[in-house]
Image (cartoon, grey):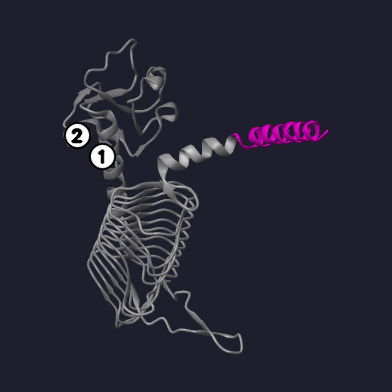
């Protein structure tokens, strides 16, 4: 799909300087622009590339003043950074819309229900009782288990596995090799020391507008549901255990781990490699610094860090003290020696 400068300007509410008929089919960084690509200039540090780029179209702010002639067609907009974000979204949408149909190498149960304009890639498997919404994109090697529900416009990238009974909302994006609905880590020690498995009979519910990174695992509940609420964004390599509940519009960075039955509030920010113990509540608006270990409930809009996690400013003061520990130790050793010498003089 190619877009002309005039079409882009109309979409963004901008004005064209140059050839309104020049077309692009992709976006690129301004220093790497070539014919057929769209670039943008928002940071003055990159201005020098504006005069040398081979890109066909460059988005710039309306008030930007040129210092040299430019070969590219310019589109002036109110905010070039917001404009490129809108264009990336548009280009991605157009690309996704072009994917339709079912590969003959896929396997779709005759007892599954598929909506309109669904794409199913090679070697994907859709089990009986599955319900797939309109405009869903299921890439190669995806597994959709029995009675799974997937909402409209959701994308499952290659290698995603969704176990039986789980529910995925509309407008979700789930990246490669993520597993949703595997058994929670539930075992009971017996008198002989053997661990007996507890059947994990619940499901996972992922609400609308959620994005989940690659190689993330979200375990099914022991009973009931593990729930990821609307608008939550989860990075790569995150572990979410059974019966966890995550509130609306929370973001979780890579390698975080959330233990069973923890409750995470709305609008929380969880840094990379954070560990959260089970059966606690993280209040709405909590921000947790990277590599923190959280073992207690938090208060609303708290900012915490460290392991064990404490108030952020207090943790920063502790870190400042940690850095002086070697010097403090040397000073204490000197003081001990001086005290010992004084004691010997007094005794003599």
Verify whether residue 347 appears in magenta. Answer: yes
The part of the image, by quadrant, that contains residue 101 is bottom left
Quadrant of the image containing the C terminus:
top right
Q: Earlier in the sequence, mark 1 or mark 2?
A: 2
| Residue 180 can be seen in this image | no
Count of marks overlaid on the render = 2
Residue under circle 2? 12
Residue under circle 1? 86
Task: Name the one closer to the observer, 184 or 309.
Answer: 309
Q: Dot 1: what SS?
A: helix
Q: Horizontal and vertical percent for residue 289?
A: 43, 46
Range drawn in magenta: 324-348
The part of the image, by quadrant, that contains residue 107 is bottom left
Task: Name the one closer to the observer, 255 or 308.
Answer: 308
Magenta-colored segment: predominant secondary structure: helix
Task: Name the one closer to the observer, 213 or 317.
Answer: 317
Q: Residue at x 47, y 78 (%)?
A: 186
Verify whether residue 13 appears in magenta. Answer: no
| Residue 131 can be seen in this image | yes
Within 10 Å of disc 1 (Cα), the crowding (few <14, some 14-19, many 20+) is some
Quadrant of the image containing the N terminus:
top left
Q: Horizontal and vertical percent for residue 176?
A: 44, 59
Q: Horizontal and vertical percent for residue 116?
A: 22, 66
Pointers 1 and 2 in contact (C-beta within 8 Å):
yes
Residue 205 relative to residue 277: left or right: left
Q: Residue at x 70, y 32 (%)?
A: 335
| CA–CA distance in space, label 1 to label 2 | 8 Å
Numbered label attached to residue 224:
none
Q: Dot 2: what SS?
A: helix
Location of residue 70 with respect to 118 vertically, above or below: above
Within 10 Å of disc 2 (Cα), the crowding (few <14, some 14-19, many 20+) is many
């Amino acid at each position: 799909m190619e877009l002309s400068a005039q079409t882009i300007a109309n979409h963004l509410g901008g004005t064209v300087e140059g050839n309104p008929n020049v077309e692009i089919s992709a976006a690129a960084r301004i220093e790497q622009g070539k014919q057929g690509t769209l670039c943008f200039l928002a940071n003055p540090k990159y201005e020098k590339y504006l005069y040398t780029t081979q890109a066909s179209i460059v988005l710039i702010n309306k008030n930007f003043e040129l210092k040299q002639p430019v070969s590219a067609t310019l589109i002036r907009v109110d905010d070039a950074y917001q404009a490129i974000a809108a264009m990336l979204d548009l280009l991605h949408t157009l690309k996704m819309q072009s994917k339709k149909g079912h590969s003959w190498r896929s396997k779709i149960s005759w007892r599954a229900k598929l909506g309109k304009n669904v794409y199913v890639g090679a070697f994907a498997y859709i089990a009986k009782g599955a319900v797939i919404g309109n405009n869903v994109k299921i890439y190669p090697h995806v597994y959709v288990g029995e009675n799974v529900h997937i909402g409209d416009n959701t994308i499952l990238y290659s290698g995603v596995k969704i176990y039986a009974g789980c529910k995925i909302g509309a407008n979700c994006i789930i990246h490669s090799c993520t597993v949703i609905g595997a058994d929670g880590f539930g075992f009971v020690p017996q008198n002989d020391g053997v661990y007996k498995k507890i059947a994990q009979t619940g499901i996972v519910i992922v609400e609308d507008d959620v994005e989940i990174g690659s190689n993330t695992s979200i375990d099914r509940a022991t009973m009931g549901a593990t729930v990821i609420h609307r608008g939550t964004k989860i990075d790569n390599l995150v572990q979410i255990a059974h019966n966890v509940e995550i509130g609306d519009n929370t973001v979780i960075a890579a390698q975080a781990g959330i233990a069973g039955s923890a409750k995470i509030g709305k609008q929380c920010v969880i840094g990379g490699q954070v560990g959260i113990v089970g059966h606690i509540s993280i209040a709405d608006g909590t921000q947790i610094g990277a590599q923190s270990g959280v073992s207690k409930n938090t208060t609303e809009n708290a900012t915490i860090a460290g392991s064990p996690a404490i108030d952020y400013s207090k943790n920063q003061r502790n870190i400042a003290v940690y850095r002086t520990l070697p010097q403090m130790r040397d000073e204490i050793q000197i003081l001990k020696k001086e005290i010992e010498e004084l004691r010997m003089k007094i005794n003599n």
